[in-house]
Image: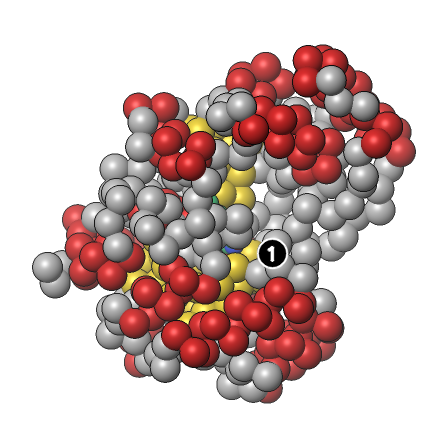
Amino acid sequence: MDIRTLFGIVHPIIQAPMAGVQGSALAIAVSNAGGLGSLPCAMLAPEAMGRELEALRAGTAKPFNVNFFCHETPVPSAEREAAWRAALAPYFAQFGIDAATIPAGPGRIPLSAEAADVLERFRPAVVSFHFGLPSPSLLARVKSWGSKVLSSATTVEEATWLEAHGVDAVIAQGAEAGGHRGMFLTDDLTTQMGTLALVPQVVRAVKVPVIAAGGIADRAGVEAALALGAAGVQVGTAFMLCPEATTSAIHRRALASAAARHTALTNLFTGRPARGIVNRLMRELGPMSDRAPAFPLATAGIAPIRAKAEASGSGDFSPLWSGQNAEGCLEIPAAEVIRRLAGTR
Ligand SMILES: Cc1cc2nc3c(=O)[nH]c(=O)nc-3n(C[C@H](O)[C@H](O)[C@H](O)COP(=O)(O)O)c2cc1C
């Protein structure tokens, strides 16, 4: 099925939901330009999410996507937290931070029944998930409103699992992609393959439309994905310098510099592997470390170090999420990014 018909959009291009670097403004601009704009909710409590959805509804009459993480909230382990704080101790000392005063707390929120109550008022055309799918009852609620459901697969096994559990389309997330790996059936990074290898294998394995994600930054990338059998693309990094994004000045500087050519998968910032520009913390403690607490609990210990460093203009301790291809990441309006990707300019 053509995803333009499935979602009611002009171009088969989804703006990837990107928690922490965008809100409703980017989604509105993309949907109004004929793509599918997305609102990430992983860092929004239900009340803030409701405000963003009001803004989206006021800003566009076009379809949009609302995105949720669906991880299990882990039981904190005092032992692991202590090991993590010990690993971070030199940085606490450097910045004069009293580790005893750092509040614990989740850095990312999964879809909850309370969030679903808010979402029900808006009944978005599309709801997408990362890290699998929510509980069968929450998924059934979302589907009962007529929302089309998407989720990311990083392996052929995850794609067939998602199809068997009722998604309307699968996002094949290649290893080039910025931000968190959507992996949920395995935590073995050696299973992760590039977009060029993953997309055709997923296309052969499932009947639902496949949306290619990871490393797509220009029209040639879109055409390559379509040639591999994808029904559309999901693009993230290329939107991060748009004026409608909320990407921080430090993050923007890194994306626009040669440093963006060196990214790695790291679990240091949240506890799950995610791709970001290599910085001091990744060089010194990782990029992968078995000392990091379970997702999303690693976030709390880093937060005060990051805040101190950012206050002096440094991204040494910030998650500088980026895909491997930041070439399409330009300071241009989101509608212009859509025109370039669609080949209509
Ligand atoms: C800054 C950033 C934040 C992201 N946050 C999310 C998110 O909240 N939810 C999600 O499903 N995917 C998220 N992703 C992953 C994207 O959905 C997508 O897989 C990725 O951006 C595609 O690769 P590209 O960045 O090379 O275009 C994020 C990606 C980036 C770069």
Asked which secondary structure carries label 1, the reply is loop
| Quadrant including the N terminus | bottom left
Disc 1: CA contacts within 10 A as few (<14), some (14-19) or many (>=20): many
> Who's the residue at 53% across and 68% down the image?
52
Q: Quadrant of residue 7?
A: bottom left
Residue labelled 1 has its Cβ within 8 Å of some atom of ligand 1: yes
> Who's the residue at 53% across and 52% down the image?
19
Task: Residue at the far left: name it.
Answer: 345
Colour scheme shown: secondary structure
What amino acid is at disc 1?
Ala
Q: Which residue is mark 1?
A: 42
> Who's the residue at 66% across and 51% down the image?
108
Image position of 205 (left or right of 286): left
Residue 180 image position (x, y, % from top left)? 53, 44
Q: Quadrant of residue 16?
A: bottom left
| Quadrant including the C terminus | bottom left
Q: Nearer the viewer, residue 311 or 128?
A: 311
Q: Nearer the viewer, residue 201 or 6?
A: 6
**135 in relation to 225, above or below:** below
> Who's the residue at 30% across and 75% down the image?
9
**76 in relation to 344, above or below:** above
**318 in relation to 76, above or below:** above
Residue 162 image position (x, y, % from top left)? 54, 64
